[in-house]
Image (cartoon, rainbow, N blue to C red):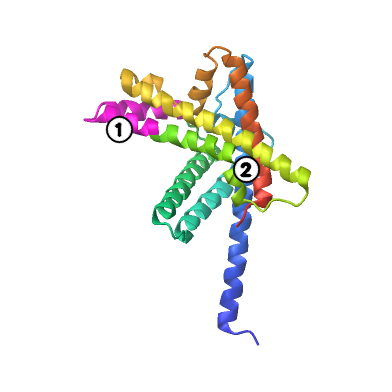
Amino acid sequence: MTTASGKTAASAAENSTIFRTLARIGYVVLGIVHIVIGAIAISVAQGAGGEADQGGAMQQVASWPFGGLLLWVIAIGLFALGLWQVVQAFLERNPDTKKKWGYRVKYVGTAVAYFAIAVTALVYALGGRQDSSQSSQTLTAQLLATPGGVFLLVLVGLVILGVGIAFVYRGIKRSFEKHLDLPGNPAARKGIVTFGVVGYIAKGIAIGVVGVLFVLAALTHDPEKAGGVDAALKSLAELPFGTFILWLVGAGLIIYGVFCFARARYARM
């Protein structure tokens, strides 16, 4: 005979399984988004147009057969993945208080990033559009118009730059491994770790350049210098050997996307 408490426990376990499955789907769709952004970045490096950011990726997905349905899947999956990060923040129990709150900030920050991409997917699923570069420039202009705005904008830029550096550091130190239950096969394990290293470094570079653009916008009082990932990647193309650098970063973002597929399978949840 099944008791009420037994039914409650079984229901909770079932809900937890569904939630974890949605979160894993979130990693899959996150991979798709990064692969599309990376492909657009490579096309920009080759002289073609396109927006190499979340908006550009969603616009590209919307043009595919069943793209509207996939946009809904992306939105739901990333919302679930963001909620999972929030849960992780609450469950963090590191005995070191500084590390505990550091991890919590990281989890919440990651959740916000996932929610932002999910909202972009939802906007496109509903037939709308978003321009991340224009949004960044509007935010920059508003901050510069406020007292202490330059300081705040520099702070925003440094925080974003710090996030980019953190991604590069995680890639070099392979710290992402502790969040994975990697397969026992040595070749598969090595391949997943290699993709993680390259992907984290490439994404860190892209995010870091966004931070630099915000700092430059603050120091020059020019909102048009600020921008999202698209502006950051296109600014790389203006550097010496910029086309080659942009091509490498685009390829790295594609590799990060493939790593997200592996993460969907092997992430500890």
Give the magenta part as a residue range. Answer: 132-158
Q: Name the residue beneath numbered marker 1.
A: 152
Q: Is residue 144 visible?
A: yes
Find numbered disc 2 in the image and state the secondary structure of the residue it sits on: helix
The N terminus sits in image quarter: bottom right
Kindly check if marks 2 and 1 are in contact, taking CB atoms under 8 A apart as contact. Answer: no
Q: Is residue 44 visible?
A: no
Amino acid type at circle 2 is Val
At 32% from the left and 18% from the top, the residue drawn is 220
Residue 233 point in image, percent of width and height: 53, 23
Mostly what secondary structure, the magenta segment?
helix
Find numbered disc 1 in the image and state the secondary structure of the residue it sits on: helix
Direction from residue 17 to residue 213 in the image, left or right: left
Residue 116 point in image, percent of width and height: 47, 41
At 65% from the left and 49% from the top, the residue drawn is 264
Depth order, front residue of 13/256:
256
Q: Name the residue beneath numbered marker 2.
A: 29
